[in-house]
Amino acid sequence: MGSSAAEVATWVLKDYVKMFQLRNPQLYMIGAYIHLDEETSHLHLNFVPWVSGCKRGLETKTSLKAALATRGFASEGKGNTEWKQWAEAEKDDIALIMRRYGIDWKKKNMHNPHLSVLDYKKQERVKEVAALEEKLEGAQVVLELKEERIESLEKEIEDKHVSIRKEQSEAQKMLDDTRAETRKLQFEGTDLRLKNSELRLEYSENVDKLTDIRKEIEEDQKEADKWMMISDTAKWQT
């Protein structure tokens, strides 16, 4: 293919890639690679099929069959699987893009009568190998996504453990502070009880002293009254 034709092929493939995600929202595109270094310009497209709203297991799963079903493709047996129907629909889409650039896609007869039985079987074997390689590539992508999910979950678990350990440390500190404050209050309570006992003892001693003083005053008063009477009697006799 000449340089001009290669440029047109590149435009066609780029337009196809731009519209791919809009046509296939359930096929998450993770890579698109246009090869111009071979005899025929071509495109390698990597995507992950997914569906959401699943009733069993995870709500969101990777499933090519279910993803294609969202576009109305359903298997009708080996001769017309949902994958084959989808591939034919994609070919029709890229054929429309090609026509916009003035290119007509002439599809070859899949069952060439001039091929020998052996050559035909070889062709079919090549197709099977290509299909298996594509499945393996898709499985590898799914595996990598699962590994990334596992790593993400492990990080979430570790972060949760760190958070729990931090909360436990803070709770332990609060408990230790509360215990220390309780011991402090207990010491203060004991000290207050001792001081209260001392005050009661001092009060009791002061009450006893006051009682003794009152008795002494009463005795002195009696003695004074006695001498007063003697003095008054002596004056009267005189």
Image (spheres, grey):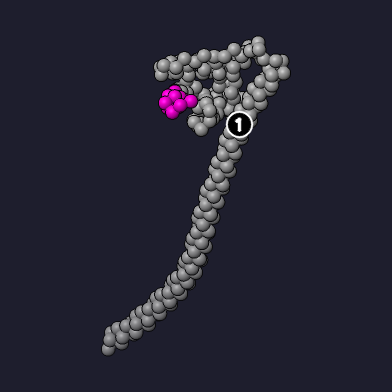
Q: At x 48% / y 16%, what residue is drawn? A: 95
**Viewer-proximal residue, 135 or 199?**
135
- Work out whether residue 60 can be spotted: no
Left or right side of 45 for 3: left
In the picture shown, does residue 81 fall above or below 28?
above
Q: Position of residue 56 (x, y in %)?
A: 61, 25
> Which of the image's four quarters has the C terminus?
bottom left
In the picture shown, does residue 41 fall above or below 212?
above
**Viewer-proximal residue, 18 or 96?**
96
**Viewer-proximal residue, 11 or 205?**
11
Q: At x 41% / y 16%, what residue is drawn? A: 102
* Magenta segment main secondary structure: helix
Q: Position of residue 52 (x, y in %)?
A: 54, 25
Residue ID for mark 1: 137
Residue 9 part of the magenta-drawn span? yes
Outermost bottom residue: 238
Residue 58 part of the magenta-drawn span? no
Q: At x 51% / y 57%, what residue is drawn? A: 173
Q: Position of residue 232 (x, y in %)?
A: 30, 83
In the picture shown, does residue 196 fall above or below 95?
below
Task: Specify few, some or many for label 1: CA neighbours under 10 Å numbering under 14, 14-19, or 20 or more.
Answer: some
Which amino acid type is marked by label 1? Glu
Left or right side of 123 for 59: left
The region drawn magenta spans 1-13
Q: Position of residue 135 (x, y in %)?
A: 63, 27
Q: At x 58% / y 27%, what residue is drawn? A: 62
